Image (spheres, rainbow, N blue to C red):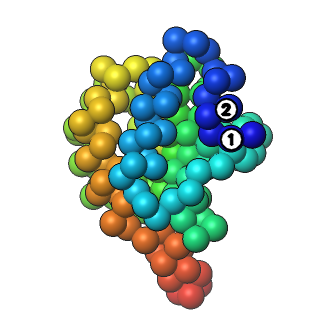
Amino acid sequence: MTPSEYILEQPADKQAFLTGIHNVITGNDNSVTAQVENMMGKQMILYKEKGYMKYALAMAKGYISLHCLPIYMNPALHAKYVELLPAAKFQKGCINFNNAEQLPPGIFSALIIECSGIDIAEVLENRKKKR
């Protein structure tokens, strides 16, 4: 299944928004490739850099979930976007939201642009070496 096919399987009222999120990620982070895979027991779009998941986009019951590994591994970046996106619900490396009011396109684009400069593969490989 392609990312476009995944989006077409989601509720009709969310498809344009999901397409916009997908386009922001793929248009602003050239280090990733998108594919639909299983993660955490469900299908979602995984955006991988050098084989490592950097982002994942999923439709959950009642909300959309963006998994963002760069904010999980960077507390300052996480704190910055918690403040900039007060209507979204944050977990360690996950942002949950329902609409563009909770995830404004300009702020979301800035997040992805900032994350695009983080080489997640290098960060993860360096973590392995320290253990």
Residue position for label 2: 6
Instruction: Give SS at disc 1.
Output: loop
Q: Quadrant of the C terminus?
A: bottom right
Classify residue 48 by image quadrant.
bottom right
CB under 8 Å between discs 1 and 2: yes
60 left or right, relative to 38: left
What amino acid is found at the position of numbered circle 2 in the picture?
A: Tyr
Which residue matches tag 1? 2
Q: Residue at x 40, y 20 (%)?
A: 99
What residue sits 43% from the left and 61% below the top? Answer: 30
Q: Residues within 10 Å of mark 2 (few under 14, many from 20)?
A: some
Question: What SS does tag 2 mark?
Answer: helix
> Does any portion of residue 123 appear in the rendered image?
yes
Q: CA distance from mark 1 to mark 2?
A: 6 Å
Q: Amino acid at mark 1?
A: Thr
Q: Position of residue 8 (x, y in %)?
A: 64, 24
Taking 118 as reference, is 60 above or below it? above
- Position of residue 59 in the picture relative to residue 72 (left or right): right
Q: Position of residue 73 (x, y in %)?
A: 43, 62
What residue do we see at 30% from left, 43% from top?
A: 109
Query: At x 46% / y 64%, what residue is drawn?
Result: 31
